Image: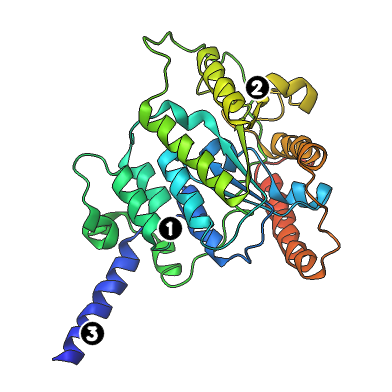
Amino acid sequence: MAVSLLVAAAGLLLLQRLLTPKYVDDVVEGAFIAEYYGEEKDFDVIFIGDCEVYENFSPVTLWEEYGINSYIRGSAEQYIWQSYYLLEDTLRYETPDVVIFNVQSLQFDESQSEAYNRMTLEGMEWSPSKVKSILASMKDGEEFLDYVFPLLRYHSRWSELTSADFQYLFQTKKVSHNGYYMRVDVKPAVDVPEGRPLGDYSFGERAWSYLDRMTALCSEKGIRLILIKAPSLYPYWYEEWDEQVREYADQNGLLYLNLLELTDEIGIDYNTDTYDAGLHMNLSGAEKLSRWLGRTLREEIGLPDRRDEERLSQIWQEKIGFYEEEKRKQYEKYGMEER
């Protein structure tokens, strides 16, 4: 009887693994959160937030130019309560010197999509932080047990299976560069729509409460919290939103960097430095941003250059090799010369 139960349980686990999305082909963003757990965790800087961090900053550039060891714990449309619990989760393993949070998600006071919820939550390892994040994120109609046992959610996914579901049944492949999503192709930003007028520009109480919790947690742990607005032209960032964040940063002694206002200083060219008409940076834009940010972290925060640490340098040599190979493949894919 016991053997039969074990065989049945193993079969269900195998079936669950097969039917759960692998995020290794088109929608690779769903794999980013899980990749962190395989890292040696001694990062100076942790980024948290949505696509405006994982598509706009290159940890490899921060290392090569400044010896700053960084990681991006980003995911698609990551809501601020998810960012807070990811920070809580990260602090189970390490205490970085700096946490950088992108403020675009303050616009949301509740989850907008189950699919985006899952791309953040399913990659987290089980902990009280994951449980709290699930409970804070679930939309009407979602069930907690569907996150505990993803088979309950994906049991009908048979018709969507691809060869990748079988190839990566037991072991997945690395798809990010310390959380950074690389794109080398170019699509200039033209005819970017203006933001439509809103009836109320105030951020919601729930969003503010989680920013307060993030601020308090960083203060308690001696971490420098930096708020940023990435230079993404869309979704639109309203002046009224910016004023609220500036006031909050001033009241709490935080550094706030609105990079939309610093594009000339950074050297961003929206004709060459974006791959999707201004929503996100391509490799050229991300490396420019990272060079500028690294200089700021060195000069204003005083982060040290760690390139003389033998073990860390060995780890980064492997990462740089993977990064350069990905660049080569993408330039070849898009028929472009390396820049």
Q: Can you say whether 276 is above or below 304 in the image?
A: above
- Alpha carbons under labels 3 and 2: distance apart: 56 Å
Query: In 3D space, how far apart are the residues under numbered discs 1 and 3 (Cα atoms)?
Result: 27 Å
Residue, x 47% and y 35% (percent of image)?
212
Instruction: Write the residue at 78% across / 39% down.
Output: 291
- Are the residues at dot 2 and dot 1 in contact (C-beta closer than 8 Å)? no
| Residue 93 x/y as whole percent | 55, 63
| Sequence order check, earlier mark of 2 and 1 | 1
The image shows residue 38, relative to residue 193, as above or below, that is: below
- Give the left or right position of residue 86, taking residue 280 as reference: left
Decide which of 27, 68 is in the foreground and name it.
Answer: 68
- The residue wearing badge 3 is 7
Which mark is first along the chain, 2 or 3?
A: 3
Q: Amino acid at mark 3?
A: Val
Label 3 packing within 10 angstroms: few (<14), some (14-19), many (20+):
few
**Percent of width and height locating residue 52:** 56, 35
Task: Give whichever of 156, 73 is nearer the camera.
Answer: 73
Q: Nearer the viewer, residue 253 or 71?
A: 253
* Numbered tag placed on residue 124 in the rendering: 1
SS under mark 1: loop
The residue singled out by tag 2 in the image is 260
Query: Residue 163: horizontal and vertical position, in percent?
Result: 41, 63
Height in image: 38 above or below 243? below
Work out which quarter of the rendered image holds the N terminus and state it: bottom left
Residue type of the residue flagged with mark 1: Met
Looking at the rendered structure, the kind of residue marked 2 is Leu
